[in-house]
Image (spheres, rainbow, N blue to C red):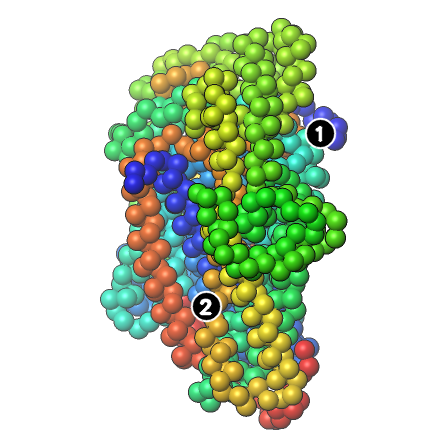
Amino acid sequence: MILHTLIDYDTLRVIWWLLLGVLLIGFAVMDGFDLGTDMLLPFVARCDIERRVVINSIGPVWEGNQVWLILGGGAIFAAWPPLYAVSFSGFYLAMFAILFALILRPVGFKYRSKRDSRLWRASWDWALFIGGLVPALVMGVAVGNVLQGVPFHLNNDLRIFYDGTTLIELLNPFGLLCGLLSVAMLVMHGAGWLVLKTSGEVAERSRTAGSVAAMLTIALFALGGLWLGAGIDGYAITSPILEGGPSNPLAKTVALAPGAWLANYDAHPWMLAGPALGFVGALGSLALLRARVELGALLMSALSVFGIIATVGLSMFPFILPSSVDPRSSLTVWDASSSHLTLFIMLVATAIFLPIIAAYTTWVYRVLWGKVEPREIERDGSHAY
Amino acid sequence: MELDVVDLSRLQFAMTALYHFLFVPLTLGLSVLLAVMETVYVMTGRRIWRQMTKFWGTLFGINFVLGVSTGLVMEFQFGMNWSYYSHYVGDIFGAPLAIEGLMAFFLEATFVGLFFFGWDKLSKVGHLIATWAVALGSNFSALWILIANGWMQNPIGSAFNPQTMRMEITDFFAVVTNPVAQAKFVHTVSAGYVTAAIFVLGVSAWYLLKGRHVEIAKRSMTVAASFGLAASLSVVVLGDESGYLTTEHQKMKLAAIEAMWETEPAPAAFTVFGLPSQQDRETHYAVQIPWALGLIATRSLDTVVPGITELVAQAEKRIESGLIAFDALQKIRAAGSSTNIPAEVKQAFEDHGADLGYALLLKRHADDPRNATPEQIAAAAWDTVPHVPTLFWSFRIMVGLGMFFIALTATFFYLSARRTLDRYRPLLWVAVLAIPLPWIAAELGWIVAEFGRQPWIIEGVLPTAAAVSSLGAGTVLMTIIGFAALYTVLIVIEMALMLRAIRKGPEPDDAPEATLIPENLVAAE
């Protein structure tokens, strides 16, 4: 096959860096409101039927939404194998915590209302809360640690070694800040969803929760940005970048420099659009929640999620996983991708399937359009959650 | 026994894979059965078929969520526990996984919501489309995961790149059309269909024994028996041993399954019973059928099936060849830029590069494979033999069960054609008691295919021991305990909910039919 040489290797790498962003943002936007809804469940819904309304609002869609995470994992594996290998094994216990929580979630949705017992249902409600909180928190903490550099190094065989990434070490102040930002952001987004899909008391409580979460998102995001500029060393490649070079991270040299994570914004001011959208989205969500523009508020919180995640990617570019103990082992866009041919094949597959997925997902959401009403659930018998 | 991180990582992977595979076969088969039942409903307009689709759909849902949950663990485990594997083969292995997500999981997961929640929101045909999308999605996912798995068994279309220290794809089409993958796909999907068919058959038989939901049970049995008969014939006839002659290690797997220590003149005999001993390298008390193995495995009278000893001798030669490649690789890396590599080194790597993985087998015996003694090389060659008694027995029980499934589904197919499904109570009891058997067969099938792949994680390319993450044994042990506890609790809950839903039975239809349909008008399947 020589078709793949139509697009040069480095261009494909940048395209796949963008697609990595699309998939992670796709996950955070689509599954994000599910996670936010799970976190809000015990607080915005008090009695059983209210809780069932909340759960059934995401009942028909959470499975499809979660595929964004599965696809994200698969695409990182296919397009950025070293990133997949280092991050999944380096954050081993964090990943375990996420998986543990995510296993509880589907089971919670499906099994909760299959029995009448109060204890049974209350237990599953808290399992769902954990299933929303833990992934949101831990993923945020992980991103916070990635921004600070992860203690790993590669040997000559490109085997990966870690020098301390226990859960406790991950929970440093900046990591926790990012974790809280992630929680606030997804609670804001989940609240937007609940306001759109429910009515009455549940919607009112969600409106209040969403407003508070939006304000927290703005505050934590601003704090994180200041901290990133002032208190955290960024990374910069100090050797010439080989054009279309092989994916071997050890061929370069890297230096740490204070404020380096903000250097991209000086060089390319248009990148400030990322953080700007993070703020605009959250402010818009706050305003539209108050103004009772329901769909608008949800779209605004999605925009905020987009902006915040894009900010992380843009600040670090071309780094995707810096190493704190051996900076030259850091993974970058130029040396951590799969081969030219694999990137091309995966691009073709994505170009074919992503539009199809978008089309039928849109159709499904249109079919399910409208608020979830208690009587609907009662009528649906064993098929509703 | 001291377990190291390799053993523990294997244990965790096996545990998750075997657990995941408790849910997958039923999802594969039941999704198709639901689609078939609903198609009958849409075509005939008889609401009893809608009731059936809804009832079996409830059971499908209870099973489906655990398949989804554990599937996520499966995907993440490669990176978590097998990071060197992920680096070494991600360029090839990752692509089918990602395409599985794009093509299959999205389809399955997006429409499964509509299947459950869309009964009143969609037209008849609209809902039918959703149901077929779920069935299609789950079957596509089997295709892509088995393309990935087939490549682990028969790694074609790829080459080692010394610059990136990993395998890279050279021919994607070859990876997709891998004959081992195709054989595995048909075999695995058929096994899923058998599982669902026996499940539906058994549960319906129980209703007939209790005299409950008789109409629904009979119709379900008719569908299940015909579907199950076709599937169980396919699973046995198109067993995946058809792929077992394509590569050295697949031949080794076949020889181990048959406990065939020495090569026999063609056509070889099939050992029905025996006590294979790994230590003595022979099979005690063997009872053999002359010719049978040669015929089954090669579909010919004159193709020789090589025995274990001969394959070990071949492995020894490949280790020696691999050492030349290993040495050349060190020189290539020492040379730095590609212009500095001496021509003879380049040539040596080109000639022997395919055996590089065999040199890595020596890592267990010597720090630098190049310093290995002849004894160590011989020991490494014997490492290529999987555990013979396990494979021998797993395979025989699996095949025996396969034969039983043919007999069972054929019997009920006949009874259904004669309209005497409820006449023979002992037969109904056999169907009820048969419910767990397809799961046993499926798990044994996994053991034959994957445990039989050892010591390789990628056959001939990367030994399992070299593929793990550099984690502490204690860390892995902790997650094993965590997963085991969670899996145990969830399977208990799952079984309890399944039994509850079965005891409760189908819900009464909200819009009963105007006319009663006589039993003899059941649509022929």
Kindly report the distance in space between the C-alpha atoms of the residues bearing marks 2 and 1.
49 Å
Residue drawn 56% across the image and 84% down it: B218
Residue drawn 25% across the image and 33% down it: A168
The residue labelled by disc 2 is: B436
Q: Quadrant of residue B422?
A: bottom right
- Residue most toward the front? B285
- Residue most toward the top? B340
Instruction: Judge by depth and name the residue closer to the eye, B221 or B349.
Output: B349
- The amino acid type found where label 2 is placed reads Pro
Q: Nearer the viewer, mark 2 or mark 1?
A: 2
Residue A325 at x, y percent in the picture? 35, 18
Local crowd size for mark 2, using a 10 Å CA cut-off: few (<14), some (14–19), many (≥20): few
Report the quarter where the N terminus of chain B lies. top left
The residue labelled by disc 1 is: A4
Q: Is residue B236 above or below residue A325?
A: below
Instruction: Judge by depth and name the residue closer to the eye, A373 or B227.
Output: B227
Label 2 chain ID: B
* Mark 1 secondary-structure assignment: helix
How many discs appear?
A: 2
- The amino acid type found where label 1 is placed reads His
Residue B82 at x, y percent in the picture? 45, 36
Instruction: Judge by depth and name the residue closer to the eye, A295 or A104.
Output: A104
Checking the image for residue A191, the label placed there is: none
Residue B149 shows in this picture:
no
Instruction: Judge by depth and name the residue closer to the eye, B189 or B32.
Output: B189
Residue B40 shows in this picture:
yes
Q: Is residue B1 above or below residue B435?
A: above
Residue drawn 65% across the image and 66% down it: B233
Q: Quadrant of residue B488?
A: bottom left
Residue B75 at x, y percent in the picture? 48, 44
Residue A109 at x, y percent in the picture? 39, 61
